[in-house]
Image (cartoon, grey):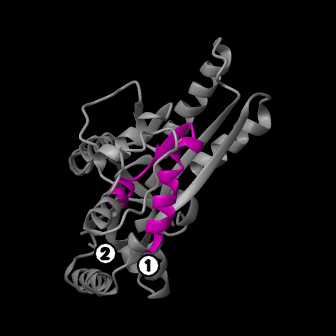
Amino acid sequence: KVLDFEYDEYINELKDKIVRLKEYDYLIITSSRVINAINNLIKKEMDSNTNTFSVDNNENENNNINKIDDDYIWRRFKELKGIYIVGKKTKKQFLKLINQKDDDYLIKTKNNATELSKLIINDIQLSCKSDDDDNEGFKYLYLCGNRSLDIIENELNDYKINNIGPDISLSKTVIYRTKLMNESYDVFKDYIVNKMNDFNDDQKIWLIFFSPSGVDVILKKAINDDIIDMINNNCLIGTIGKTTKSCIDENYDQYFNVEVVASTPSPQGVKSSIYNYNQS
């Protein structure tokens, strides 16, 4: 583990968005770290002695909310028209968070941000073609980390520029921060250096990236430490998905190519893709 994630720094931003969730039509989640951030918020609230969440005026005045919990969050989320999530694993974590069974009508998933963007745009187009009077605009809340890519907002902006229709707004809100664990990175660096000294020229090891943030944090540090050529010459690169691969292709293609992309965005998918690569 080379990366760590900070949640407390943004807890007030997350709290504010959940309180004002009625201002939005849809929620977008592209990382399981968002679920961790919400869990962290719930834990902080349950451990607190004060009520930090307001009750809507149209709710029963006797129904005081002393603590935010998964039921409160689910009631807020159920008021949305839909929830878009990247990855079945993240969706599973989300359903566990709110103690709910699968709800395909409310929650839709795709394997990466590009595919999710296309789904969102397709739903906008279908809504505009329908006789629904409640499509004056589309307001999206996008909860993400500080190193999230701009894929979704770029796709929505391009759609708005090239199409005349209801207003589309996206509120991209950072609720966690990705940071490098220096001690773990030093272990990684020492492993790469020492392992390379033990290898023959035709021996290589696999270096797998599981997120774009991991790519940026680790490879920028590797470039500064002047071990990027060592990685290039002695490692085979793999990624857990297309979005992570795109991050490498767009920013680090001068150093190396991605050899495998997981057939499914999971550790087992990575393992299967490496096996198929080695058999070819």
Task: Please provide percent x and percent y for residue 195.
Answer: 22, 81
Q: Quadrant of residue 204?
A: bottom left
Quadrant placement of the N terminus: bottom left
Q: Which residues are magenta?
A: 9-38
Task: Please provide percent x and percent y for residue 18.
Answer: 47, 52
Task: Please provide percent x and percent y for residue 96.
Answer: 24, 44
Q: Dot 1: few (<14), some (14–19), or many (≥20) neighbours within 10 Å?
A: few
- Residue 71 seen by the camera: yes
Q: Real-space Cα distance between discs 2 and 1?
A: 20 Å
> In the image, what residue type sits under mark 2?
Val
Q: Dot 2: few (<14), some (14–19), or many (≥20) neighbours within 10 Å?
A: some
Q: Which residue is mark 2?
A: 2
Quadrant placement of the C terminus: top left
Q: Which residue is mark 1?
A: 229
Task: Please provide percent x and percent y for residue 159.
Answer: 71, 36
- In this rendering, the answer to whether 226 lies above or below 94 is below
The residue depicted at 54 percent of the width and 42 percent of the height is 22
Residue ranking furthest to the front: 62
